[in-house]
Structure formats: structure tokens, C-alpha cells
């Protein structure tokens, strides 16, 4: 297409309804729009309502991309139904919800995409979807569209699922619970112990909806025209190189920082703790959060609570509604909030990037969600890892064993307040913390360099844009 032509390739982007997917997906939309693509960005209706509530807006009037459009980007915003009533509690009934979604949602998307591309407004449409959605390639094929798959976790996790057949042939899929074995034959993965592989590939979770959905999705991703990764080449070089032998893969991360934007993404109201943080000395505060989705037990919460108190380290702790079970709002030990006084702050939700960027933050006790991991790396903040499920144990391996920018809170999942206190204390003040900080600063620089115009992710994104345009014409 000639520069200056009015025809612009048009991305249809349907977002997965989870915070850890919404954030990178919105940033990808902005990044594509900045390269002169037109975007139709689609949220599920219930997500639109959640966002509106979190931002105190009138649902019917909200257009989350208005500001982006005003700044010259061509982004249209719309919503679609997932087929469930708005008041259906998708958190409480998560598994039931996804069982239905797995079968019914692709039919809805098919219909939706069909209608969009028939409208005269759309020229040169292509489909961009989260890799976890299995419908992208088949629907793209049906309508003769180019398909782009976006993976929001590390390439290592992608590679392990992608190479399922190799793992299966070697007798490691599903891998046996409680048996630790070293695997060194997955292309581009030097070595990984089964204890560090995502639990949904284990015997215990085999057949779960997560395992089935991902296994279906990874059959389909093999048919995608392009695969984008929210990671950087320098950190996962061998893994990406091996994947590139099969299909075009592009490492374009860290995506959450590549566009200056004020688009509201939080599904919950953000509490502002800037004032409190600004009164604390540099590097003195530990930030604690287990992300937007996972749950843990009341006992773990209690041990961590008293561990934090015993450590005498100042902290900010995001205790999200539903962290133990939905509807249970009393998860902290009785009287805990009175005991902490000015030592800590308990918040229901915050602007995590703003918190991590504050000079007062010296460490992050994290569940190792990939966005949290990469946000912490971007801010040069070392981590204490307490992975719970999904990709988190695998991300822990990268953080602790490979990149040496974090330590594990404990072996396995059982936590003890005295040990938690010791870990936190030495992490925030000891000599290990110096080497962690040193490595974290190096990784921060790597991420910053990657995003420069001539950095690896900058170049990779430009390459993707060129290859995509070529394919579209
Ligand atoms: N997050 C936030 N405020 C909070 C806690 C989390 O904005 O109080 C954001 C965080 O910045 C990240 C996302 O929520 O972008 C969580 O994604 P992640 O992949 O770390 O974990 P998940 O929620 O998917 O388990």
C-alpha cells in the first residue's frame, strides 16, 4: 500500500477477559495503531461493565479509547456478549463458564467477525487474538484473513506447550506428580525440571479445562500466520530461535511500557498510595501482590501476614477481593490491620506499575504472573517468588535460576511465618540483596534497550509490521 493512501489494514482484536491479558492486549492495540493500522478493539460486555464500574463511569457512554483517538490513533471500540447474563458470576463459576466458552464462544466470534468484515467500513481486515483462544486460526481461514496470535507469557512456557508431542513421546506428558525429572531435549530449552513445568501439564491436572483449552489453542496456533511474544530476545534467545524454525515468531516486549497512554485498564478501583510511599526512604518498602486471579488459603495469608510483621520491613500489600474465596472479605487475621500501624498498607487494588516505579520500593513479593514479573524487571525491582499455579512455577525458574533477579520464598507451597520473616529481612537488607539488585539493574537496562527504535523488540516489531503488510497485499 502506498504511503498516504486512505486504505489502512484493519485489525480486529478480541480481548481475553482477564487483567493479565487485558493489559498487554490494550498496549498491543495502541502499538499497532501507532504504526498506522486501524483497530477495532473488542471487549466482552461484562468486562466493559467491570471497567466502567472501576472508573466510576456511566456504562452506556464509556469509550475507553476516546483519548487515544483524540491523539490521532484510529481505534474503534466495541463490545460483544459472551452469551452469559451480565450478573452471572464468572469468578465463582469459572470452570463451568469456560466449559461453555470453549464450545459456544467460537460460534459467537465467527458470527461477530463475519458481520464486521461485511461492513463497508473495513478494508484489509486481519484478526489478532490471544494465543489462549483456539478460534483465531480457523475463523481467519474461513474468512480468508491473516491471523496474528499474541502470547502474553514467556516464550519458555509457549515452547513447552508447543512441544507437547515431543514431551509425550518421551513419556513426560502428563508429567508425574511428585517425581522430579530433568528434561533436556525440548528444542531451545537447555534444561528444565518437571517441578518447574506448569502444573496443568501434570497428571493431577490432566483433563482440566485449562489443559484442554490450551492444548486445543496450541494445535491452532500452529496455523497462525504470525506469533507475537511479550518477551525480549536477549532474555529468551535460544527458545525463540528454536520456535522460529517452525513459524514466524516476534519478541516485541515488554509491551506494557511501549505506548504512552492513559487508557484505563484496571478491573478494580485503584487506591492511591503515592503519598504514603513518598514518605518512605528509597528501597525500604516491600510490595506484595498475588495478581488478579489466583487464590490461596487463609492459612498462607496468615503466615505471610505475621511473617511481614515479624520482619519489621515496611510493606504495601494488595489483598484482592477473592484472594481466598469469592465473597470472603475477612481474610486477614483478626486485629492485623491495627497491629501494623504505619509499618504497612493494605490495599484492595492499586496501579501496580506506579507503585513499582516509586523509589521507595525495594522488592516485590510476587506470585510470578508474567506481567508482574516483567513490570518488576522494567522497574529494576528484585523479587521474592511465591508461585501458585498456571505459568507461575515456570516463571519462577526464569527469575530465580536463570536470571538471578529473585529468590524463592520457600520450597513448595507451605509457608511458615518465622521463615517468611527471615527471608524478607535478609532479602531487603542482606548481601544477597546487593547481587540481586545488581542483576535486576542489568535486566532493566536490557528491557529498556530492547524497546529503543533500534533495540531488539523495536526492530522485531517493525519487521512484523513489514511482514504483515506484505502478507496482506
Ligand atoms: N495489577 C494492578 N494492580 C494490582 C495488582 C495487579 O494493576 O493491585 C496488574 C499488574 O500490573 C499486572 C496484572 O494486574 O499487569 C496482573 O497480571 P499478572 O500476569 O502479573 O498476573 P495474573 O493476574 O494474570 O495472575
Image (spheres, grey):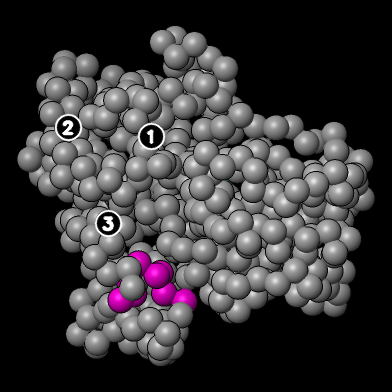
For the C terminus, the image quarter is top left
Q: Which residue is mark 3?
A: 209
Q: Secondary structure at mark 1?
A: loop
Q: Which residue is mark 2?
A: 108
**Horizontal and vertical percent for residue 245?**
27, 71
Q: Secondary structure at mark 2?
A: helix
Q: Give the label on residue 213, or none.
A: none
**Horizontal and vertical percent for residue 229?**
40, 55
**Horizontal and vertical percent for residue 223?**
17, 56
Q: Is residue 26 something one can see in this rendering?
A: yes
**Horizontal and vertical percent for residue 72?**
47, 19
Q: CA distance from mark 3 to mark 2?
A: 20 Å
Q: Earlier in the sequence, mark 3 or mark 1?
A: 1
The image quadrant of residue 423 is bottom right
Magenta stretch, overall SS? helix
Q: Which residues are magenta?
A: 196-203
Number of the front mark, 3 or 1: 1
Q: Is residue 346 above or below residue 420?
A: above
Q: Is residue 72 something one can see in this rendering?
A: no
Q: Label 3: how many residues lie within 10 Å, few (<14), some (14-19) or many (20+)?
A: some
Q: Give the label on residue 89, or none.
A: 1
Q: CA distance from mark 3 to mark 1?
A: 18 Å
Amino acid at each position: 500500500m502506498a504511503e498516504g493512501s486512505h486504505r489502512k489494514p484493519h485489525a480486529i482484536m478480541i480481548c481475553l477477559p482477564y487483567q493479565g491479558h487485558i493489559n498487554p492486549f490494550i498496549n498491543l492495540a495502541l502499538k499497532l495503531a501507532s504504526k498506522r493500522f486501524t483497530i477495532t478493539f473488542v471487549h466482552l460486555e461484562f468486562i466493559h461493565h467491570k471497567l466502567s464500574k472501576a472508573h466510576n463511569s456511566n456504562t452506556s457512554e464509556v469509550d475507553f479509547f476516546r483519548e487515544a483517538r483524540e491523539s490521532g490513533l484510529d481505534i474503534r471500540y466495541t463490545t460483544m456478549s459472551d452469551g452469559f447474563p451480565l450478573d452471572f458470576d464468572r469468578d465463582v463459576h469459572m470452570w463451568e463458564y469456560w466449559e461453555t466458552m470453549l464450545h459456544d464462544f467460537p460460534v459467537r466470534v465467527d458470527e461477530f467477525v463475519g458481520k464486521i468484515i461485511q461492513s463497508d467500513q473495513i478494508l484489509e481486515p486481519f484478526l489478532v487474538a490471544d494465543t489462549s483462544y483456539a478460534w483465531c486460526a480457523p475463523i481467519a481461514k474461513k474468512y480468508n484473513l491473516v491471523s496474528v496470535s499474541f502470547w502474553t507469557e514467556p516464550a519458555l512456557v509457549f515452547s513447552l506447550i508447543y512441544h507437547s508431542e515431543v514431551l509425550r513421546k518421551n513419556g513426560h506428558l502428563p508429567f508425574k506428580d511428585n517425581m522430579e525429572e530433568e528434561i533436556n531435549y525440548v528444542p531451545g530449552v537447555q534444561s528444565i525440571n518437571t517441578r518447574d513445568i506448569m502444573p496443568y501439564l501434570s497428571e493431577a491436572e490432566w483433563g482440566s479445562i485449562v489443559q484442554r483449552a490450551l492444548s486445543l489453542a496450541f494445535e491452532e496456533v500452529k496455523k497462525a500466520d504470525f506469533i507475537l511474544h511479550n518477551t525480549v530476545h536477549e532474555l529468551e534467545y535460544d527458545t525463540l530461535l528454536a520456535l522460529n524454525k517452525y513459524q514466524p515468531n516476534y519478541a516485541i516486549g515488554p509491551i506494557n511500557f511501549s505506548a504512552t497512554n492513559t487508557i484505563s485498564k484496571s478491573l478494580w478501583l485503584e487506591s492511591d498510595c503515592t503519598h504514603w510511599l513518598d514518605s518512605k526512604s528509597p528501597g525500604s518498602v516491600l510490595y506484595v501482590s498475588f495478581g488478579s486471579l489466583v487464590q490461596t488459603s487463609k492459612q498462607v495469608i496468615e503466615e505471610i501476614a505475621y511473617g511481614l510483621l515479624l520482619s519489621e520491613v515496611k510493606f504495601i500489600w494488595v489483598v484482592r477481593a477473592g484472594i481466598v474465596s469469592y465473597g470472603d472479605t475477612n481474610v486477614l487475621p483478626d486485629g492485623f490491620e491495627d497491629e501494623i500501624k504505619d509499618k504497612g498498607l493494605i490495599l484492595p487494588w492499586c496501579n501496580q506499575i506506579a507503585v513499582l516505579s516509586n523509589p521507595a520500593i525495594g522488592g516485590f513479593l510476587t506470585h510470578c504472573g508474567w506481567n508482574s514479573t516483567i513490570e518488576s524487571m522494567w522497574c529494576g525491582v528484585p523479587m521474592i517468588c511465591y508461585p501458585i499455579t498456571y505459568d507461575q512455577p515456570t516463571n519462577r525458574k526464569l527469575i530465580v535460576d536463570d536470571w538471578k533477579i529473585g529468590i524463592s520464598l520457600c520450597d513448595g507451597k507451605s509457608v511458615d511465618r518465622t521463615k517468611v520473616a527471615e527471608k524478607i529481612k535478609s532479602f531487603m537488607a542482606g548481601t544477597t540483596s546487593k547481587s540481586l539488585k545488581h542483576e535486576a539493574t542489568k535486566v532493566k537496562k536490557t528491557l529498556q534497550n530492547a524497546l529503543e527504535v533500534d533495540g531488539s523488540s523495536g526492530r522485531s516489531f517493525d519487521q512484523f509490521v513489514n511482514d504483515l503488510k506484505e502478507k496482506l497485499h
